[in-house]
Image (tube, rainbow, N blue to C red):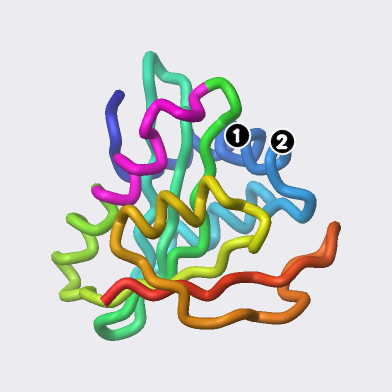
Amino acid sequence: MNIRRMQESDLLQVADIEKAIFSVPWSLESFRESMELEHTIYLVAEEKENIMGYCGMYRVFNEGEIVNVAVAEAYRRKKVALQLLEQLFVESSEFKVDNFFLEVRESNQPAIQLYKKLGFIEAGIRKNFYEKPRENAIFMWKR
């Protein structure tokens, strides 16, 4: 597995993974616009030119908001998300980011357990944060 910065040529596969996983997916254009911003870091995990997963973060001063973490169904339970996030932490240190936060569906126990393993703690609930289906989000911090 190779983890690297997301490129324009990755966007079709990334958008396909996004559509397969999320009920309200980001568009290809949303990913393009986000990854081109100076204050973002977007990574992909690939194997033989197949995108296995991706993650993205917006940074504001010394904080990073993790906005995307997704792994294609065929590559789950292979530590892809773990390795993506660990690399994201390494790359964000270049920008002096040392605090991270994210929201996760309260029903997404595998993701919650992964985030806890990485040092995130639950900091609150955002009521009705998600749509389709409507669900609360757990707000998590890593300092």
The residue wearing badge 2 is 20
How dense is the environment of label 2, judged by Cα within 10 Å: few (below 14), some, or many (20 and up)?
Answer: few
**Residue 103 at what x, y percent from top left?**
55, 69
Q: Is residue 100 above or below residue 70?
A: below
In the rendered image, residue 83 lying in the magenta stretch gets the answer yes
**Residue 64 at what x, y percent from top left?**
35, 73
Is 143 on the left-hand or right-hand side of 107?
A: left
Is 21 on the left-hand or right-hand side of 117?
A: right
Q: Name the quarter where the N terminus is drawn.
A: top left
Picture quadrant where residue 7 is located? top left
Judging from the image, what secondary structure is the residue with disc 1 in?
helix
**Towards the viewer: 95 or 23:** 23
The residue wearing badge 1 is 12
Q: Tell me the magenta residue range.
A: 75-86
Give the residue displayed 32% in from the left and 72% down from the top.
Answer: 142
In the rendered image, residue 141 lying in the magenta stretch gets the answer no
Give the residue displayed 54% in from the left and 61% down from the top.
Answer: 33
Q: Amino acid at mark 1?
A: Leu
